């Protein structure tokens, strides 16, 4: 394991502190499931409280940074060259339903370049982290994407935003195309962990059409340092802020790009002739 930088240590410390509160709140969710009101408001408060903890810890250590969070948006200096990109609770729906699959995601960006990422799963105590040029790690184990090259042997994760109904038909077309190729499909509802699972060789690929910078910033650094590939779903270069993403091992990236493009196109309604 390479020596961790001071910046990465700040990120890990902040994630671990926020995790303590979220773990406690998660243990309360099952008691709220049977209530008439339900746990929705409680989880929303837990989410915001976690982001406040992360903001306090990260900005205390690096007051000249900007901060982009899912809950609070842009904060800090508008002309800062460095910023934190944070999702305090990725997998909110899982958390809400008492499902133990969610994470804290912290990305570090310098002059427009992603330099470090931390994704922490507090329930499984799995800490994924990476710095550019230093490799990717899960706790103390170095990560590398899988070497599978056959789609029929691949596990491919995906996500979909239910409210964006115009994405449903293309997504269903992509599912049909992947099933026809014999791929195993997973939808676990936490993009940051999906990307880290590709980095760890647990999945061969992950794609989703509606995502935000805080969903993917940390995971992209980890994925790249594990020798994975990231583009948009049609193969174009991924830029932070692009809504859609495809990550995979190098061997399956071209086949996945082709099958996702074809599946989405086949699902579009065809104009009548004449």
Image: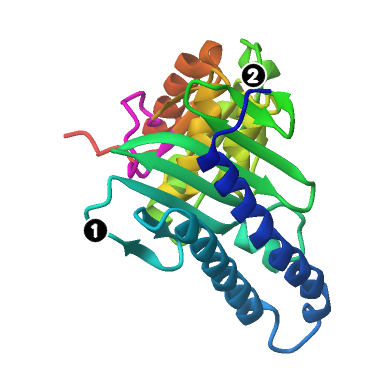
Q: Tell me which corner region of the image, top left, top right, bottom left or bottom right, holds residue 99.
A: bottom right
Which range of residues does the magenta coloring cover?
232-245
Q: Position of residue 109 (x, y in %)?
A: 38, 41
On-image quarter of the C terminus: top left
Residue located beneath label 2 in the image = 144
Predominant SS along the magenta part: loop
Q: Residue furthest bottom?
A: 36
**Above or below for 225 versus 79:** above
Left/right of residue 140 with respect to residue 80 in the rendered view: right
Q: Residue at x 59, y 77 (%)?
A: 45
Q: Tell me which corner region of the image, top left, top right, bottom left or bottom right, holds residue 194.
A: top right
Q: Position of residue 118 (x, y in %)?
A: 58, 42
Using the rendered image of the protein, determine whether residue 132 is visible from the camera's viewpoint: yes
Front label number (2 vs 1): 1
Q: Residue at x 52, y 69 (%)?
A: 52
The crowding category of the residue bearing disc 1, from other C-alpha atoms within 10 Å (few below 14, some 14 to 19, many at least 20), is few
Q: Position of residue 104 (x, y in %)?
A: 61, 53
**Element class at badge 1:** loop
**Element class at badge 2:** loop
Visual colour scheme: rainbow
Q: Position of residue 174 (x, y in %)?
A: 50, 34
- Asked if residue 153 is among those painted magenta in the image, a careful observer would answer no
Residue located beneath label 1 in the image = 78
Using the rendered image of the protein, determine whether residue 211 is visible from the camera's viewpoint: no
Left/right of residue 69 with respect to residue 82 in the rendered view: right
Q: Residue at x 32, y 35 (%)?
A: 239
């Amino acid at each position: 394991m390479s020596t961790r930088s001071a910046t990465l240590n700040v990120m890990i410390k902040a994630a671990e502190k926020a995790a303590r509160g979220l773990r406690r709140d998660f243990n309360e969710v099952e008691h709220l499931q049977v209530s008439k009101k339900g746990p929705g408001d409680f989880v929303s408060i837990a989410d915001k409280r976690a982001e406040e903890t992360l903001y306090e810890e990260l900005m205390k250590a690096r007051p000249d940074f900007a901060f982009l969070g899912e809950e609070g948006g842009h904060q800090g200096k508008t002309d800062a060259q460095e910023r934190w990109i944070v999702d305090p609770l990725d997998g909110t729906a899982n958390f809400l339903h008492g499902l133990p699959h969610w994470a804290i995601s912290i990305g570090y960006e310098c002059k427009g370049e992603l330099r470090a990422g931390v994704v922490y799963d507090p329930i499984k105590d799995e800490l994924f982290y990476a710095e550019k040029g230093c490799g990717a790690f899960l706790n103390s184990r170095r990560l590398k994407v899988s070497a599978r090259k056959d789609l029929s042997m691949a596990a491919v994760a995906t996500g979909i935003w239910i409210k964006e109904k115009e994405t449903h038909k293309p997504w269903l077309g992509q599912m049909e195309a992947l099933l026809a190729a014999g791929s195993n499909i997973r939808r676990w509802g936490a993009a940051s962990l999906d990307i880290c699972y590709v980095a760890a060789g647990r999945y061969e690929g992950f794609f989703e059409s509606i995502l935000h910078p805080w969903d993917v910033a940390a995971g992209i650094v980890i994925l790249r340092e594990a020798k994975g590939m990231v583009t948009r779903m049609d193969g174009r270069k991924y830029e932070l802020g692009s809504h859609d993403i495809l990550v995979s091992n190098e061997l399956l990236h071209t086949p996945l790009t082709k099958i996702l493009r074809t599946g989405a196109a086949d699902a579009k309604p065809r104009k009548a002739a004449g």
